[in-house]
Image (cartoon, rainbow, N blue to C red):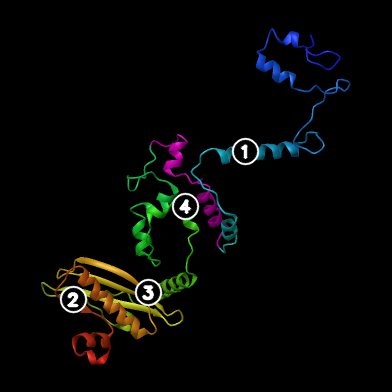
Amino acid sequence: MKIFDFLRQWNLSLLQSFLSVRDQQAIEDTPLGDLSRKDQLVWDYSKNGTYSIKSGYRWIQSRSIVLRDTRQSDACVVPKALWKVIWKLEVPPKLRHFLWLTMHNCLPTCAVLFRRRSSLSPACPICRCHDKSIEHLFLQCSWVEPIWFGGALNYKVDCSALPSWVVWLQVPINPSKVLFVVFSALGSFLVERTVLGSCRSDGIGRAGQVFWWCSPASPNIKINVDASWSKVFKLGFAGVIMRDEDGRFVAASRYFLKASSAIAAEAIALLRGCELGAALGVTSVIIEYDYLDAVKCLSCSLDMGS
């Protein structure tokens, strides 16, 4: 039974017994097509209206992208500029692929495995305090933070300003500082390897020199200070360590410094050692340093330096 007649009008008398007034009005407002032509299937996702495997694949891809963007996800949008930087890195391909996995949140962390019902708990097995996400794995874990801060980069992770791993990767860095740190670390490694390869005796250092650490008399605290400096970059680092009369560790710190000369760098390092002792409220100290002129300025006369 047709609900429209040859005059291309809807048969409202037939519709009234089945539909509401509102539905009838909606159907009546729908225009009828050309009844002289037969109906045919038209694929709306190709220009000629004919289905092809290529057009079907594109439709599936566009549909999956829309679903991915509409549903809530832990991963944030990765800028194209960051992708270009990663794929152009002069590192082994497996490292570039590893970064790709981290930015897509594809690493099998406890949080991801728990969400996929493949783990009993999302908690970090190391600190057991927070869920083991990508950010927690590389930056926020209490066992990981000391490595960043105690390493050559001396990086302090600010958890409050860390929305995601992708955002952290886009934090700008100072290339000169990174190069200096890399060359300093490599130089130290090569020197120590040479020393260990040529002499294995305890207490023996470079050129056969003997180094002995003597404990201070009570109630003194001994502060050992040393500095490194690059003539090319005018940058350096100062290391400070404090120990008591029993040789027990009290405190240590590492400082980044800028100096115009090696002498200035050595003086700044000595100053940082004094500042660390003052900050801890130590009143009786013995400062041990390998730069004699700086030590004389403190123990003898200030006329030797400013």
Please tell me which of labels 1 and 3 falls first in the chain: 1
Q: Is residue 203 visible?
A: no
- Asked if the magenta segment contains residue 43, the reply would be no
Residue drawn at (50%, 58%) of the image: 170
- What is the C-alpha distance between the residues marked 4 and 2? 46 Å
Q: Which residue is mark 1?
A: 64
- Looking at the image, is mark 3 or mark 4 earlier in the sequence? 4
Mark nearer the N terminus (2 vs 1):
1
Circle 1: element type: helix
- Which of 200/259 is in front? 259
Dot 1: few (<14), some (14–19), or many (≥20) neighbours within 10 Å? few
Image coordinates of residue 195 in percent, x first then y, are: 36, 77
Q: Mark 1 vs mark 4: which is more N-terminal?
A: 1
Range covered by the magenta-colored residues: 91-120
Mark 2: which secondary structure? loop
* Nearer the camera: disc 2 or disc 1: 1
Q: Position of residue 122 (x, y in %)?
A: 39, 40
**Residue topped by disc 3:** 192
Residue 270, picture quadrant: bottom left
Inspect the image, locate mark 2, and give the three-letter code of the amino acid beneath it.
Cys
**Rendered position, 293 above or below 248:** below
Q: Secondary structure at mark 3?
A: helix
Tell me the distance, in whole angstroms, between the alpha carbons under discs 3 and 4: 35 Å
Which mark is in front, 4 or 2? 4
Query: Which residue lies under the disc numbered 4?
Result: 165
